[in-house]
Amino acid sequence: MTVQLDARPPVAPAPQRSPGRLSRLDTRYSPYLYVAPFFLIFGIFGAYPLAYTFWVSLHDWDLLGADHPFVGAENYTRLLADADFWHALVNTLGIFVISTVPQLLAALWLANLLNRGLRARTGWRMAVLVPNVTSTAAVAIVFGVLFGREFGMINWMLDLVGVDAIGWKSNRFASWVAISAMVDWRWTGYNALILLAAMQAIPRDLYEAAAIDGAGRARQFWSVTVPLLKPTIIFCTIIATIGGLQLFTEPRMFNSGTNPIRGGPLRESQTLTMYMFENAFAPHYNFGYGSAVAWLLFALIAIVAAVNVLLLRRLGGDRPQKGAAR
Amino acid sequence: MAVIPRRRLAAVALVAATALLVTAGCGGGDEPGDGPVTLTVDVFGQFGYEQLYQEYMTANPGVKVVERGTGTNLDEYSPKLTQWLAAGRGAGDVVAIEEGLLVEYKANPGNFVNLLDHGAADLKGNFLEWKWNAGLTADGKQLIGLGTDVGGIAMCYRKDLFQKAGLPTEREAVSKLWPTWPDYIATGEKFVAAKTGASFLDGATNTFNTILLQTAGNTSGYSYYDTSEKLVVDSNPAVRQAWDTTMDIVDSGLSGKYGSWSEEWVSAFKQSKFATIACPAWMTGVIEANAGTGAQDKWDIARVPGNGGNWGGSHLAVPKQSKHQAEAIKLAKFLTSAKGQIGAFKAKGPLPSSPQALDDPAITGATNAYFSGAPVGAIFGTGAKSLKPVYMGPKNQAVRTEVENAVRTVELGQRSPTQGWTDAVTNAKKAAAK
């Protein structure tokens, strides 16, 4: 609010009006313009495929066929009674659990180590990210060879210590472990760096206070670091959930030979995305059924992510910051 | 309130502008023009066309030929081809279709150019009758593809390993070891007893397929589906017989259990881990590629146990989405001509489906230097004209996958032969219904 002290009229009121309107338009609409690219890209590559997949899942849709009769929820009812679908679901969850839990724990431990006064700290921090830079397919092929039944290095080393050869590809649990090893090798460092960044944001005085109260290193870690990392841990868990439940390249490349999409003769390591591919593309080309798998997978990810959030909220309930806001 | 429509207008304008940009970006395909035409040929495995492309390009200066997919597994190739066809873009101008998948593609003939509309009818005499017919739709009105090769079967074996086991190494003598499959098993037992450190055969699935197609060819003429397209996996004696013989092979401990086409299978070739492999004519190129120059002259080719048989073979088709249909049809005709088939045979071993080519001295007198100079022309070519085709049903590939995996579970000791058979039948029925 400016107060006019003299009687002179304001200088050039007219030219001021026009930029004023423009700038009003600018402040009002340009934010939409700035965020629009994301929503456009999301609309084209996210929302539209999502809706289209749902539309397809309501039809008997042969990939090459000319007619796609509407069948309503039939694909879904058939899918819920499909033993192979549930088998793939168990595989996916199994691999998810035995890869994600050790992965996040290892990442937390690694981040804690990197947070200390190490020599050549940046070097170490960069080094943990290196596996993530490698192409997934290359990792999967190398691991597939390492875990070979007869010519694999892992079985050769087991043999040295007197353990019998393990059929890494024909034993359900062994194949889960092998695939989890692949996933962890690739993602542990990435998560460690994210956790490290969050750790560095924790005020030093909290540790000092804890030390004065007589807390040792372990106690400080569990009572100060972990609770304060909760939002980051939730973030890492959700990202790992989405990645873990959509696991495709690792198990697909791990199984070489004829119809690798089955994940072994008894579908030992077939994940849901592989089952989706098997149905939507070769050898079944049943696009409608494959789309139904995709939608159930979407629902599953949403459920697991929600469960994650609830569980982690409860675990870290004694969070010092913003605790009262809830 | 006047703001809302304006806001809406802005959004609409933005969407429209972006949509315009996107469509403009997509529109820049290669339009047919006067310049040189590039023809893409999609194949899997080893078709042996490189020399022929060179020849064709020299004769047709305006055409450039590019091949994609050389050496890929059929399981990688076929989903890609189907996706390209479904999407209406992406497929090559000439595409190879394997016999087991031909029926599925023929069910939707609209994806392909009808070669009968382009003078292909005159070429009928250039192909074995059944090979020609396989390319026709059920009503006989559309020709989807021109035949490339047929899959006459022999038995490839390692001379060095046979010698180590005290077995004959000379191909005539080896052929005499196994007039029948039980004889083959008996030989295998002798081989295993000699403890060479190698298995007698690569894996049970290849052998199962060979026995099945041989038995089916010699009896009913169909395997998993009868000619009325009814699934007969549990009632066709040919399937059961092939299963039982394969189980005998597994029981006798002859199999190296290397899953066909897997990394281990390839390693086993390199490390000389098995002594025999059922080999359709096209397999000779695969063996050479996998075993490498180190195993040259160690391999040889004998007769297959039992009586003949046909496994595999392909057709070349032109998708309707091709922008250069006329040129593509011309190229497909050239590659499937007797001359083209002879060229492919010389390069990578696929056996011609053209009777003229089969009679040509270039084939009848052909030898394969890699396989100790084996007279491959005589081994595969003799009897090729009397090969009996096996009818493949609509979901042949899916059903075959299930049965082969059941074989594999028994081979790996995950299932008993009885359980394996139950699995095979149940899963095959389920796959056929999908």
Image: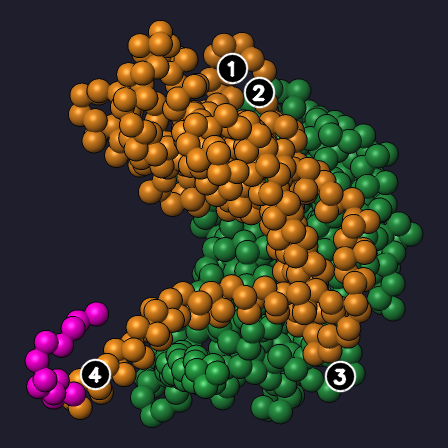
Chain colours: A orange, B green
Foreground disc of the pair 2, 4: 4
Identity of the residue furthest to the top in this view: A214
- In the image, residue A12 lies in the stretch drawn in magenta: yes
The residue shown at (84%, 66%) is B229
**Does residue B228 appear to the left or right of B23 in the view shown?**
right
* Circles 2 and 1 on the same subunit: yes
Identity of the residue furthest to the right in this view: B235
Measured along the vertical axis of the image, is residue B211 above or below residue A125?
below
Foreground disc of the pair 4, 3: 4
Q: Secondary structure at mark 1?
A: helix
Q: Position of residue A150 (x, y in %)?
A: 54, 27
- Asked whether the residues under the numbered discs 2 and 1 touch, taking CB atoms below 8 Å apart as contact, a structural biologist would say yes
Q: Give whichever of A34, A321 is nearer the camera.
A: A321
Q: Residues within 10 Å of mark 3 (few under 14, many from 20)?
A: few
The residue shown at (21%, 31%) is A122
Residue denoted by label 4: A19
Question: Spatial distance from mark 2 to mark 1, Cα to Cα?
Answer: 7 Å
Q: Give whichever of B264, B211 is nearer the camera.
A: B264
- Asked whether the residues under the numbered discs 3 and 2 touch, taking CB atoms below 8 Å apart as contact, a structural biologist would say no
Type of amino acid under label 4: Pro
Q: Secondary structure at mark 3?
A: loop
Disc number placed over residue A10 in the picture, else none: none
Disc 2: which chain?
A
Disc number placed over residue A159 in the picture, else none: 1
